[in-house]
Amino acid sequence: MTLDDEMLQEIESGERWLGEVCQEPPPPNADRIKLRVRIAAQEMWLHGQLNDATPTHLADRTMQTVRAAIGEDRAAPASGPRSRNRYRRVAWWASGVAAAAAIVLFAFVGFQDRGELPSGPSFVEVFESMGESDLEMALAALAADVADLEDELGDAWLAQADDWSLQSIGDAIDQVMTEPAGDDWL
Amino acid sequence: MTDSSELVSIVGRARNRDIDALERLVDRYSARLYGFLFRMTGNPDDAEDMVQEVFVRLVKSIVHYEEDGRFEAWLFRIAANLARDRGRRQKRNPVVGSIDEDWTETADERTEPRAWIAPRVPSPDLRLTLTEEIVRLQAALNRLPTEEREVVMLRHYTDMSFAEIAGMMGSPLGTALARAHRGLAKLRKWMESSS
C-alpha cells in the first residue's frame, strides 16, 4: 500500500466518522431567505426594465436618488442592535423595490386623469422614444416626487414592505409600464 | 423525472428568475448551505445572513451559470467565497462583528497563530440555542486553520471531489488531500479527548 493509498483510506475513515458525529444545527428561516430571493429577483427585473427603457446611467442615477431619498434611518427600529441591522438590510432592499414601484405608480396615478385608460404608446415605449435630456428631466421629476409620496404614506408604509407580496408589486409595475402612457408623456 | 434532470429543469427556470424555481432552490439547499456556513463561521446569525447573501448572488449571477451538472459545486463556491471574504475582513479588523459577542477564546489558544480570528467558546445565549454536541464539534472546528476547515466542510456538505475543491481553492490536489487528512485527524483527536 502506497503512502497515498494509506492517506486516502484514513481520509475516508475520517469522513465516515465525521458523518456520524456531525449533528446539524437547527435549519434557517426559509421564509426569510425566500423573501430576500423574491426581493432580489424583483430588483433584478426592475433594473432590467429601467435599463431597457433608459440609458443605463440614468436608470442607475434614478435608483440612487430613490435610495438616498428613502434613507436607511427611515426603517422603523427593532429590538436590539443585531435585529435592527438585519431589519435595515431587508428594508433597504424592500424599500428600493417599493420606491421604484412608487415612481411608476405615481407617474401613472399622479399624471393621468382617473377614468378611462388613455390609448397610445406605453411608458416603456415613451421612455424609449425620449431624447436623453427630456428623459433625464422626466425621471428627475419623478424621483423628486417619491419623497413627497412617502411623506404622505408615512413610515408605516415602508415598514409594511417586509410583509408585502413583492410578486404583486412586480406584477403591478409590469402592468403599469406596459399600459398606455397618455398624452402628458408624449 | 430523475433528481438530476429535475434539478436541471429547476435551474433552467431559475435562470429566467422564475420565483417558484428560485424558492425550490432555497428549499433544496438552504439547510445545507446554512450548515456549511455555520460550521465555517461559528455564528448562527451570521450564517443565516450569509445564506441570504448566497441566494441573492445566485439570483444575480445564475444567468452566467453554464449547465454542466455541477450546480451544487457552483453554489457552494459562492458560499465558500463569502466565508473566505468574511474571514479576511475579520482578520483585518478582528474586533468588528458579532463573533466576539458570541464566542470567547480560551487562554491557551490566544497565542496560537491562526488564519483568522475564530471564536472558541459560545456565550451563554448562544449555548442555549445549540446542543452540546454541536457546540463541541464547532469548538473543535474553530481550532482548525481556515483552509483545513474549508476542505473538510466542503467534502462533508457537498459531493465535490478533492480535485474540484483544489481547483476552487487554487491549490494543488495534494495540498487539498493533505489538508483534509490533517484536519480530520485533528478533529477526531480533539473530539475524542473532550468526550
Image (cartoon, grey):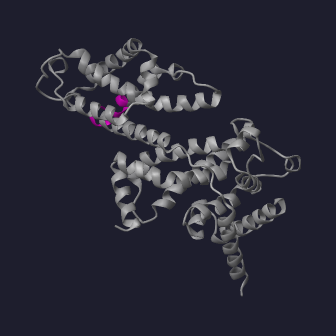
Q: Which residues are magenta?
A: A51-59
Within the image, what quadrant is residue A60 found in?
top left
Is residue A53 a member of the stretch shown in magenta?
yes
From what the image shows, is residue B133 above or below residue A171?
A: below
**Where's the C terminus of chain B, which quadrant?**
bottom right
Q: Residue A25's x, y, as percent?
A: 63, 51
Is residue A144 a member of the stretch shown in magenta?
no
Compared across the picture, whether A169 is left or right of B33 comes to left
Tell me if I can see residue B170 in this picture: no
From what the image shows, is residue B126 above or below residue A70?
A: below
Which residue lies most toward the bottom here? A1
Residue at 33% across / 23% down in the picture? A103
From what the image shows, is residue B11 above or below residue A104?
A: below
Tell me if I can see residue A144 in this picture: yes
Q: In the depicted view, which residue is nearer to us: A172 or B57?
A: A172
Q: Residue A143's x, y, as percent?
A: 36, 19
From what the image shows, is residue B171 above or below residue B84?
A: below
Within the image, what quadrant is residue A179 found in?
top left
Residue at 81% across / 45% down in the picture? B105
Within the image, what quadrant is residue A141 found in?
top left
Compared across the picture, whether A125 is left or right of B93 comes to left
